[in-house]
Structures are given as C-alpha cells and as structure tokens.
Amino acid sequence: MKAVAYSIDKTEKWEIVSDMDENQISRLEIAGFKSIKNASIDFGNINVFIGANGSGKSNLVSFFSMLQSIADGRLAHYVSSNGGLNAIFHYGVKTTRKIEVGCYFGNNGYGFELQAGQNGSAYFEKEWFYWNFPDNPDRRTFQLPSGQSESQWRIGTDTRIDKFVQPILDKQKWRKYHFHDTSETSSIKQLCAINDNIELAENASNIAAFLYRLRVSDEICYRNIVRTVRLIAPFFDDFILRPNPLDDSTIALEWKTQNRDTPFSASQLSDGTLRFICLACLLMQPYSLKPATIIIDEPELGLHPAAISVLAGLIRSASKRNQLILSTQSVELLDEFEPEDIIVVDRKDGASVFNRLSANELKSWIEDDYSMGDLWKKNVFGGRPGK
C-alpha cells in the first residue's frame, strides 16, 4: 500500500510504502502538545520509542489518550484530569496558544487545531477530515464545524470521506494499555462483572471475565495463552475461571499450580507474572477482538529478562496483523528489535525530537555484533540523559 501524508501547514508531502492496515496510523503531525513543540513521525508495524527520563516518550504515548478522549466527546474531562491547559500545552498557554494535529490512517486522516480559551477551557478552532487526492491536493481537506468545546467529528463533512474516517474514530481503532498497577487495591485483583467481556479493559480490570469468555468461545486461543504463561512461570498450571459462588454475576481471577486443584487468588501472583498474564492476553487474543493499533507504555515493567524475550516474541507475532506502539527503557527489550523498529526520543532546546534509526547508518556496528541495547548504552544514537 502507498500512503501519502501532508504536513500540518500543507507545504510538504510524503509517500509512505507499507503493508499496513488503513485503520492503522501511518503518520502523526503534532505541535504544541506537552514537550512536543513540533514533530512529524512516520509509523510502521512496530514502533519502539526509547529515550531518557523526561525526553517525551510518555508524552507521545499520552497523546493517544487525548485523541481517544476527543473521539469520546470527553476533551474537557481529559483536560481537567490531566492538570489543566498549562500541563497540556507546550510550556503552558502563555507560551503556546494552540495544539495542532494531523493523524493519518493510510489515505485518510483526521486533524484539528485546539485553541486555549477562557477560564481554563479549550475549543476547536479548526477541525477536518482528510482524503488523499494525488492529482488535486487542494481538495485534500474537508472542514468540520469549528468553535466548539468538543469535537464535531460525528456530524461529518457531508462528503464521501465520512464513511472512511468516521468508522476509525467511532470504533477507536487505536487503544492505549497500561498494566502498571498491581497493588493490593488494583482492579485486576478485584471481582468484576462476568458480562464485562466485550474487550480487554485498558488496565485489564476485567481480565477474569475476558479470559472466561475466551475459554468458552475460543479454546485454542485460551490454551495458547495458558501455555505461554507457563513459559515464564513453570509452577503455573491453569486459571480457575468460575462465577463467584456467592454472586454468579461476578468473577475473580484465580489460578492453580501443577498437580494441585487448590485455588489461589491474583494476589498470590508476583507483580511481574500478573503483568505478563495481562500482556499475553492482550497480544494473543483473537484478531477480531484486537484494536488495529495497540499502544503500551513500558510493557517490560517488573518482568524478568527471560520473560522480556518471550514478550518480544509476542509483539513480533502480533505485529504481523496489528500495529504496535511501545515506550520502553529496557535494554533487554530493545535487543529484540531491528533498527528500523526503533524511534529515539531526545530533548533538545526544551522540546522532544524523534528520530527513527536506520540499519545502513549503523551497519559497521551491527557487523561487529553489537546489539541495539549495546549501542544504546554506548550512546551511539542518543536517547541517553544529556549533560
């Protein structure tokens, strides 16, 4: 597939050759958001963002949460729950009055200009759908109603482009996941509604109900998940998935060890094992249930190096049909990927800068058997703390 994208100011044009699904993100143009003053990022099937603390990796990942809130009509909630406009606009609203975004899905796209308003509010100064017309680029954008505090994408542009872009925003074919919270109060360890099983929750709060669904509806997939968990936790035998005996409308995550039927609770799993179960369920679930683009912030958190290697295999396997966007600080995870999979994030002059690696530029190092992790530690391509 050849995808064409234009810069926010429409002065540049790029051709991207990819076998990606047109529901996946081919390019992101973003300016004025958190540490990102102005960036243009091409996306492939695997996109591993690395960088020092504070470089802006997590800010890039958090943008997709804002985009999801916009699609849900909940921008005001996102702003208020993330520290207000000064925390979202680059160096605050006194420095930056506008966030500009162009998000391209193959030949289609969605974009907006978000203006800082009065009393800590924001409004859409401009909002548009995009469709690539190679022979007539002046017709590439279709304006939506502007001046509103929430997105008007559902209203559409009354053009044929609506049927291409609206389904992407409606079904939110990108999804950010985080499985960091494995404390005793974590929702992963609590009872959940047994019918909460349409999709895996972003924090895996419904993992017991979701695994229960897989065991009933797709036993092959379920058994593959169980076998994969055993690779990193040999003591693990299987999940015990049953409606709560005291309330059959709820279910909790339970499991058993080899040769014993005694049920153990999720609290009796290590943090790393519990996170790996969530990751395996996310990456190995049936393709029909997955979002087109899966976004995970620091998936390696709490995992043993052997588990990280298994995780990388799951990521590569999932990337054959899905797009993966990852943020990591793990040398072991980085070692598992090719240079072209890696995007280095550095902080320069107070702003995040993104640079995708090239195998040709690193050829001499690679021929000397240096891994990507080795080169990162040697500061060959950046992504390390600056002085």
Image (tube, rainbow, N blue to C red):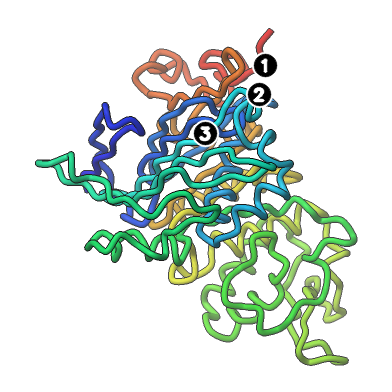
Q: Earlier in the sequence, mark 1 or mark 2?
A: 2
- The residue at the far left in this view is 135
Taking the spot 73% from the left edge, 81% from the top edge, the residue there is 193
Q: Amino acid at mark 1?
A: Pro
Mark 3 vs mark 1, CA separation in Å: 29 Å
In the displayed structure, would residue 250 be above or below residue 294? below
User: Picture coordinates of residue 281 (x, y %)?
Assistant: 61, 64
Taking the spot 45% from the left edge, 15% from the top edge, the residue there is 365
User: Picture coordinates of residue 384 (x, y %)?
Assistant: 63, 18
Circle 1 sits in a helix, a strand or a loop, which is it?
loop
Mark 3 vs mark 2, CA separation in Å: 27 Å
Tag 1 near tag 2, CB within 8 Å: yes
Taking the spot 71% from the left edge, 54% from the top edge, the residue there is 179
Q: Which mark is residue 98?
A: 3
In the displayed structure, would residue 197 be above or below residue 37? below
User: Picture coordinates of residue 274 (x, y %)?
Assistant: 76, 59
Q: Is residue 314 visible?
A: no
Res 15 quadrant in image:
top left
Taking the spot 17% from the left edge, 39% from the top edge, the residue there is 137
Circle 3 sits in a helix, a strand or a loop, which is it?
strand
- Residue matched to label 1: 385
Give 244 or 314, whichever is nearer the viewer: 244
Circle 2 sits in a helix, a strand or a loop, which is it?
loop
Badge 1 crowding class, 10 Å Cα cut-off, few under 14, some 14 to 19, many 20 or more, is: few
- Residue matched to label 2: 52
